[in-house]
């Protein structure tokens, strides 16, 4: 692994455990086994490193979500794609996902200032898909904002609860096969709650 990527992986792990203020440059370089000037050389400092980790994840999600929203197809299919995208991303990048969720829960101003533009943009895309579905009669009438937050929350719980799930689901391995089961379950559960009742 290249030095730059090694630093990012180590920093994400430490930030996910202790937050920005609980991690020093020395902590990162010692765990990454790189020299003290490596963070300044590659990132210009700890804050820029922290920013890049957040933007990497949030920016990738925004790019993919924009692509999904612009595809032809019904809102139901777009939400299916979003759920698969989101769960796959946080499953394959668990440490970075935990870092983002920890900072979000703590409400750190530095973090919120960096991520807010992405959260706002992604929310607006999802609201648009939700409102289109309501307008077309695919989804029942509801507050589109709350519905979106509930959908995202359902996706997040499986990454946030993984340490507990590993104990509760003793016979399950948290692998790609289990991820597919979670995607199918979450999709069915979320869309089942959104669907408009068919008129008789």
Image: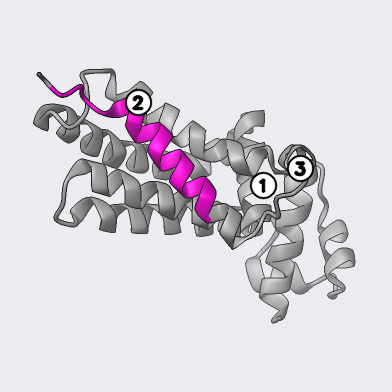
- Name the residue beneath numbered marker 3: 163
Q: Are marks 1 and 2 in contact (CB under 8 Å)?
A: no
Residue 110 makes an appearance in the image: no
Which quarter of the figure is the C terminus placed in?
top left
What secondary structure is found at the residue carrying circle 1? helix
Classify residue 10 by image quadrant.
bottom right
Q: State the separation of the CA atoms marked 1 and 2.
A: 30 Å
- Name the residue beneath numbered marker 2: 193
Graded by Cα atoms within 10 Å as few (under 14), some (14 to 19) or many (20 or more), the crowding at tag 3 reads few
What secondary structure is found at the residue carrying circle 3? helix
Please tell me whether the stretch drawn in magenta is mainly helix, strand or loop. Answer: helix
Q: Quick check: 157 left or right of 77?
A: right
Vertical side of 75 occupied by 81: above or below: below
Which quarter of the figure is the N terminus placed in?
bottom right
* Residue at 15% across, 35% down: 132
Q: State the separation of the CA atoms marked 1 and 3.
A: 15 Å
Vertical side of 133 occupied by 19: above or below: below
Q: Nearer the viewer, mark 1 or mark 2?
A: 2
Is 36 within the magenta?
Answer: no
Residue 112 makes an appearance in the image: yes
- Name the residue beneath numbered marker 1: 99
x, y percent for residue 142: 26, 18
Q: State the separation of the CA atoms marked 2 and 3.
A: 27 Å
Q: Nearer the viewer, mark 2 or mark 3?
A: 2
Graded by Cα atoms within 10 Å as few (under 14), some (14 to 19) or many (20 or more), the crowding at tag 1 reads many
Q: Nearer the viewer, residue 103 or 46?
A: 103
Vertical side of 195 occupied by 160: above or below: below
């Amino acid at each position: 692994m290249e030095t730059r990527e090694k630093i990012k992986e180590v920093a994400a792990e430490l930030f996910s455990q202790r937050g920005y203020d609980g991690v020093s440059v020395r902590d990162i370089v010692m765990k990454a086994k790189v020299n003290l000037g490596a963070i300044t050389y590659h990132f210009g400092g700890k804050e820029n490193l922290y920013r890049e980790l957040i933007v990497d994840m949030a920016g990738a999600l925004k790019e993919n979500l924009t692509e999904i929203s612009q595809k032809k197809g019904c809102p139901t299919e777009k939400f299916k794609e979003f759920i698969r995208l989101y769960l796959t991303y946080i499953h394959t990048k668990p440490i970075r996902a935990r870092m983002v969720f920890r900072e979000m829960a703590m409400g750190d101003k530095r973090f919120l200032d960096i991520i807010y533009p992405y959260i706002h943009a992604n929310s607006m895309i999802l609201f648009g898909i939700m409102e289109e579905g309501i307008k077309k009669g695919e989804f029942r009438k509801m507050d589109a904002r709350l519905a979106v937050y509930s959908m995202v929350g359902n996706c997040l719980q499986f990454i946030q609860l993984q340490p507990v799930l590993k104990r509760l689901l003793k016979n399950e391995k948290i692998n790609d096969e289990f991820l597919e089961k979670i995607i199918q379950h979450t999709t069915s559960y979320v869309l089942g709650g959104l669907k408009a009742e068919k008129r008789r």
